[in-house]
Amino acid sequence: MITFEKTPGWLDWYAGPSKPRFKLPAGAVDAHCHVFGPGALFPFAPERRYTPCDASWQQLFALRDQLGISRNVIVQATCHGADNSAMLDALAHADGRARGVATVRRGVSEAELHRMHALGVRGVRFNFVRRLVDFTPKDELVEIAQRIARLGWHVVVYFEAADLPDLWDFFTALPTQIVVDHMGRPDVSQPVDGPEFALFLRLMREHSNVWTKLSCPERLSVSGPRALNGEARPYRDVLPFAQRVLAEFPDRVLWGTDWPHPNLKDHMPDDGLLVDFVAHLAPTPEQQQRLLVSNPMRLYWPEETTA
Ligand SMILES: O=C(O)c1cc(C(=O)O)oc(=O)c1
């Protein structure tokens, strides 16, 4: 049996999260979460940049039930490279209550894409975060995007805000819906009206195929306070950014826990308090319904939506 040693300083996901005070609407979707391994069953990729703790689908689905979430979108984590087995195994055990976002290379066969579709994959992830991956050449990504577009899938992109100018032409030429991870990772110590975030808002304004996830306040926050020890109003510096996006693009926003929170360095949030954060970010029932239910359902379970 292969055993893996975690990256030094690795923070494990928070065991025993609190029960959220905010009651999620019926049918709420966690549109960004991952599974890690378990490494003994689904070995981590040789090219990985970090070695995480295990985080199985059993543990993910237990969290889902505890937090009052109905469905998950499981995004392939970079520690598994382009071997989607752990994520697909999770989908296979989800009773239709999970969709997946895969990482594929140019050599992926049509048969494999169709197998993944049958299991619930609806997108591929292109990652441009230097600390996580070696970049895949753009011509390869374009080829992949054209192939998956035929299946009705979309492209999830992960990048740092400072890199958006360089990636703009590539993103705006993609033939699918595009979902930007974690609001394009704004530097929340800059003003919400500053030029960097303005560029991201412009991307969404000028391109109606661009969506984003109002996720990862625990990763983006500089000032905190952290979602720990019952803190009722965590990550206040992230709120203006998320609220700005929600106000302007209420139909193209998603929310996710980001469980099991890879690579956090200074604390591991209580996921129950992360659910409570949603009530601050989207205070009205109508906003909550779109963010948590109707938007993700339209993207990931369109066959179940009528509108
Ligand atoms: O910021 C990160 O470290 C991170 C990593 C991964 C991944 O390794 O896939 O996914 C995320 O959504 C965020």
Image (cartoon, rainbow, N blue to C red):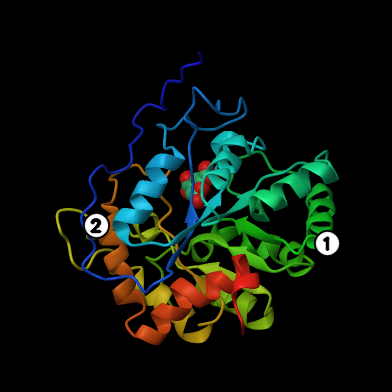
> Does residue 228 appear left or right of residue 73 in this picture?
left
- The mark lying in front, picked from 2 and 1, is 1
Residue picked out by circle 2:
227
Q: In the rendered structure, which amino acid carries the disc numbered 1?
A: Arg
| Residue farthest toward the left in the current orientation of the protein | 229
Mark 1 element type:
loop
Distance from label 2 to label 1 (Cα)? 41 Å
Instruction: Tell me residue 74's x, y (percent).
Output: 53, 51
Packing grade of label 1 (10 A; few <14, some 14-19, many >=20) is few
Q: Quadrant of the C terminus?
A: bottom right
Compared with 32, 206 (above or below) is below
Residue picked out by circle 1:
150
Compared with 215, 197 (above or below) is below
Q: Is mark 1 within 8 Å of ligand 1?
A: no
- Residue lying at 37% horizontally and 26% vertically, measured from the top left: 8
The quadrant holding residue 178 is bottom right
- Inspect this view and state whether residue 277 appears: yes
Instruction: Tell me residue 121's x, y (percent).
Output: 65, 53
- Inspect this view and state whether residue 195 appears: no
Q: In the rendered structure, which amino acid carries the disc numbered 2?
A: Ala
| Residue farthest toward the front in the current orientation of the protein | 95
> Does residue 67 appear left or right of residue 54 in this picture?
left
> Does residue 182 appear left or right of residue 9 in this picture?
right
Do tag 2 and tag 1 residues touch (Cβ < 8 Å)? no
